[in-house]
Amino acid sequence: MSVKRWAAVARRSSDSPGREAGAAPASVEPPTPSLWAAGSLGFQPDPRQAEVLDAPGARVILCCSRQWGKSTLTAIRALHYAWFHPDSLVVCIAPAKRQSRLFIHKIERFLRARLEAPIRRDPRDPLSLRLPNGSAIIGLPARDATTRGFDGVNFLIFEEAAFVPDAAWISSRPFLATTNGALWLLSTPNGESGFFFHEWHDAGADWTRLSVPATGCPRISRSFLDSELRALGPHHFAQEYLCEFLPSRHQLIPRHLLDAAITESEYPLLL
C-alpha cells in the first residue's frame, strides 16, 4: 500500500468513534518502514539504511560504522512499530541516560513536526512517549536496577549494544517472555567481549545479521576517512569505521588464540 493510500485510510479511521486523530488504523497492512520514513517522516534512507529499516525477522543485529545514522534508524523503526501496532510497548535500552533522552527526542520531533500527533508521557517514566493509539515508547539507561520490572514488551532495542553491560542484557531479556516480541541489537564494535560480540559471532543464533562499514556510507567522504586513519591509526580506525572486532590494547591474549586452545575432544590430554 502506498503512503498516500494509507494516509487516506488513516483519516477515515480517525473520524470513527473511539479513535483519536492521528492514530493509525490497525486493520490495514502498513507501508514498509523505509517507505513510511520517506513519505511520512521526510527521511529519505539510502539503500543500506532502507535494507536495515525493512530487515525481515524478529531478531536483527546490526554492526555499523560510527556516524552512519543508526540512532535515527532506531528511532524510526521504533516509531513505525508503535504507530502501526496499537497498544504495543517498545523499549529502547542505551548505555547512558543522555543517549536514551536523545532517542526519545528524535521520536518526539517526528511526532510533532511530521505526524502532528500530541506529545504525551507516562508520568512514571519521564523518558517515554504515549501515542494516540495506546502504544508507548520508553527509553532506558543500561543499569541493571532500572531495567527490571517491565513486562509485556513487544519490541526491545539495544542501542550501542556493545557498550551496554552484560548485566543489563541479562536482566532485560525476560521483557519479551510473554510476547515473544522483536529484538534488535545495533552497535559499533567494542572489543572482543560482551553479549554483542558473542551474539554477532554465534553461528547457531537465529539473527538477521547486517554489517555497514563507513566505506559503504555515501555521507562519509574518502578524504575524511583518510584523515581519520592517520589520526587514529589502523587499530582504532578498523574498529570505529570498518566494523572489525579487535582485541583491546589491555587484552593480554587475543580472542582467536583462546578459541584455538579450546577443544571439544572427550580424551584427556596426555602428560
Image: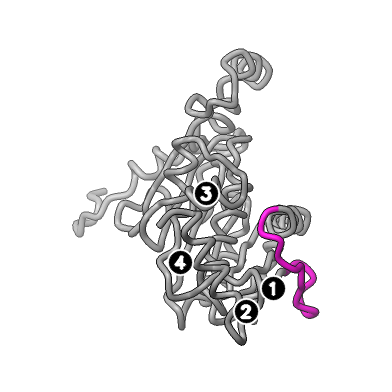
Q: Residue furthest bottom?
A: 18
Q: Specify start and end residues of the magenta stretch as a single range.
A: 114-128
- The earlier-in-sequence mark between 3 and 1 is 1
**Is residue 166 shown above or below 90?**
above
Q: In whole angstroms, how far apart are the C-alphas of marks 3 and 1?
A: 36 Å
In the structure shown, which secondary structural element does the residue marked by tag 2 occupy?
A: loop
Q: Nearer the viewer, mark 3 or mark 4?
A: 4
In the structure shown, which secondary structural element does the residue marked by tag 4 occupy?
A: strand
Q: Nearer the viewer, mark 3 or mark 1?
A: 1
Q: Label 1 is placed on what type of residue?
A: Arg
**Is residue 231 shown above or below 95?**
above
In the structure shown, which secondary structural element does the residue marked by tag 3 occupy?
A: loop
Residue identifier under label 3? 193
* 271 in magenta: no
Q: Label 3 is placed on what type of residue?
A: Ser
Q: In whole angstroms, how far apart are the C-alphas of marks 2 and 3?
A: 39 Å
Q: Are marks 2 and 4 in contact (CB under 8 Å)?
A: no
Q: Are marks 1 and 4 in contact (CB under 8 Å)?
A: no
> Dividing the picture into quarters, in which one does residue 38 lie?
top right
Q: In whole angstroms, how far apart are the C-alphas of marks 2 and 4?
A: 19 Å
- The earlier-in-sequence mark between 2 and 3 is 2
Residue identifier under label 1? 130
- The earlier-in-sequence mark between 3 and 4 is 4
Residue 232: x, y in percent?
65, 22
Residue identifier under label 4? 182
Q: Label 4 is placed on what type of residue?
A: Ala
Q: Are marks 2 and 1 in contact (CB under 8 Å)?
A: yes
Residue 134: x, y in percent?
62, 79
Q: Are marks 3 and 4 in contact (CB under 8 Å)?
A: no
Q: In whole angstroms, how far apart are the C-alphas of marks 1 and 4?
A: 19 Å
Residue 230: x, y in percent?
64, 14
